Amino acid sequence: MRAEIIAIGSELLTPFRLDTNSLFLTSELNKFGLRVTHKSVVGDTPEEMRSSFGQALERADVVVTSGGLGPTDDDRTRETVAQMLGRKLYRDEGVFQKIQERFRRFGRAMPEINARQAMVIEGATILPNPKGTAPGLWIEARGHVLILLPGVPQELRGIFENEVQPRLARLGIKQRLYTRELRITGIFESDVEERVSPLYPQYPDVEVTILAAPTGIQLHPRLWSEDAAKAEAQLDELVKRMSLVLGEYLVSTRSESLEEVVARVLTERRATIAVAESCTGGLLAERLTSLPGSSAYFVGGVVCYSNELKTSLVGVPAELIEAKGAVSPEVALALAEGIRRRTGASLGVGVTGIAGPTGGTPEKPVGLVHIGIADERGPRASEFRLPGDRERIRQFSTQRALDMVRRYFLFPA
Amino acid sequence: MRAEIIAIGSELLTPFRLDTNSLFLTSELNKFGLRVTHKSVVGDTPEEMRSSFGQALERADVVVTSGGLGPTDDDRTRETVAQMLGRKLYRDEGVFQKIQERFRRFGRAMPEINARQAMVIEGATILPNPKGTAPGLWIEARGHVLILLPGVPQELRGIFENEVQPRLARLGIKQRLYTRELRITGIFESDVEERVSPLYPQYPDVEVTILAAPTGIQLHPRLWSEDAAKAEAQLDELVKRMSLVLGEYLVSTRSESLEEVVARVLTERRATIAVAESCTGGLLAERLTSLPGSSAYFVGGVVCYSNELKTSLVGVPAELIEAKGAVSPEVALALAEGIRRRTGASLGVGVTGIAGPTGGTPEKPVGLVHIGIADERGPRASEFRLPGDRERIRQFSTQRALDMVRRYFLFPA
């Protein structure tokens, strides 16, 4: 079964905004057995909308629209669809009262224009909106289903989860999409492909999407099947074989981010961590504290941009910086060791490097980063030469640092 | 004149990827007088492509496609367009040699499949690709222009800037889009609208798009006009009047981010800054160091998650934390004062708050944040109650802290 998604709104045709709702909708429609074969963005003029809606209804079994259900003159989805289907619009008193109540709850009188949002297309099923005023509409016409949803993401999600999901389930589509997600880090995208692609011929029905970012690589095996048990077994087997060839580069097969895996192992081992970072400017601490509950393992950090602070706050000897340079394995070791000692954390991490765009030399180019990690037995350091601009080098550096922490626990040398 | 954008590729119909090229293309097309009236994403099957291309060519003067020009069997844009227009495909020897040379330059033999990328549609103008193998194609047909570009963003941009821009300029479209950008912070989106919307009736031809994020609000006034001087003057006047009503909430009328404005004033005043942050976990230091050259004003920072570190690294008296609590104006002041003293920066900033989701109490709820700022005359603090989840609270907190630094210099109390 085929689905199409249409986002409505002139602001989505500017250089400033993308239709991000379609990612959520695609994931949801796939779960219920609908392949998304076309997505579009149209302005809010009735001609544009009529042309796009009409074509979509011809091609697809289910069409989902987002946007154009607001209270203003620019919100013309309801009128346009009614006209296109030759149906009447009427004011639904139940919806009207709910909108009035909603305004009353917030201590306001309902502005007159909001009455428009109580207009409903003849024969449509009203999908109550738990987070806003405009309800969604479920319309069956010409053997197809047309689902109108508001464009505000949390309203769209609320209606989808409460009202659309159970109705899609009742369509009884046997073929469903089954998926897995593997997260990988510390290896190039091309190397991941080289390792996993020899497995593909044995799984001809599985499509694998690969995504690469400074925060790691994701593999998404996806399989359309009518047989849940068989599909799950096949994906489990493929994931197991992928895991074997990916080895210690595999971060998770359960959609966990590297931050989550590091948080989990630190918590399991009852370890604590502190960081002293230079070129990453706070990003490593930020990533370590991005998860709720991080105070259980994260003690603190120092962003020592100047050499003086490396000495005064972390205790790196000034002579060492003088002799070896701030970007050196020795200083990375001293940062890791120093922050561990000064904070009492069980693990210290030190990062020093050249994020650029300036500051590089032939011997120490932009992208050179040293990362140290210290425990009670002493420190060790690794050197990296990272590609990209300032932002990417900072992202890659923190990725490597977090991965060193992961490996410290899971693959001790 | 109307333009449509079509992105081709089955991975763009998964829940993982958006067609971000269309933002760049929209901005560029607008500059040359083309309004984008429709965007779509289609899979790589010829039927899908034919249906979308055909409709777009009927509706729009210019159609730009991205993707489907690669070397594999899935890359069918060339074949499909040739067939649709009833034109032949031929191998262009010039293109073929360039592809071979490119592989030679990287020390590789050209794989046979890449020969496909030298296939060209009869009558098309070849648009050389400075960053990849597949050239773009400029095709005039049925009174319309069809521009085929590769999907890799840097290749698409390279071809667009070198080859498409001058050709669009030669279309001689008189009406162009003129734009401005205002950045605002420290005020709600609805308050921005309340202040600026009374100006709209006097500028009926100007469309204003408003974007809100934790990193501030953007206003984009846009005006289509055939008279450049008149349009620029009108926008200048509107920006001046918007600036007046926005007052000190206005960060920039020159597309500068808050980080850039803060960097500029710190540099101009020859001031230096250091930060001690708790709930923001390093994000404030990260934002202050995100720009090249930040070592000129950023001395360093401490992420003092634990109370012990607030005392040992920043010198906040343990008794003060005991008496007032870690999240208190007094501790924010002591953090600002302490980090200033310990680092020798001219300005110290301290942030303490509750980012959640846990840790809130009725008196000190999630979202309560105290920010202190200290100079040689002593510290002062402000209290904020910020909305949203952990990530938003951290973002908003750093936004408020950076804005306090901006106001410290530009609007001294």
Image (cartoon, coloured by chain):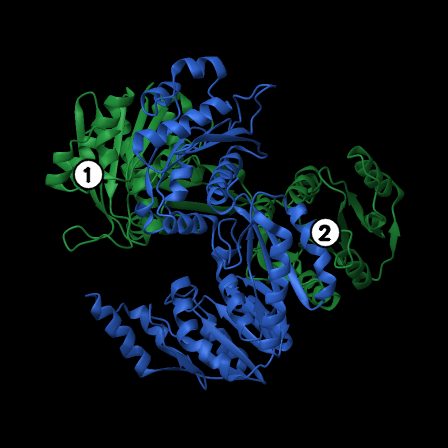
Chain colours: A blue, B green
**Residue nearest the observer in this picture, A229 or A309:** A229
Position of residue A326 relative to residue B252, above or below, is above
Label total for image: 2
The residue under label 1 is which amino acid type? Ser
| Horizontal relation, residue A241 to residue B340: left or right | right
Dot 2 amino acid type: Leu
Which badge, 2 or 1, comes first in the chain's sequence?
A: 2
Q: Residue at x 35, y 30 (%)?
A: A339
Residue A261 % position (x, y): 45, 51
Q: Nearer the viewer, residue A339 or B74?
A: A339
Q: Chain of mark 2?
A: B
Residue holding disc 1: B382
Q: Residue B79 location in percent, x, y?
A: 80, 59
Question: Residue B14: percent from the left, percent from the top?
Answer: 59, 62
Per the image, label 1 sits on a secondary structure element best described as: strand
Residue in view at x 54 percent, y 66 percent:
A26
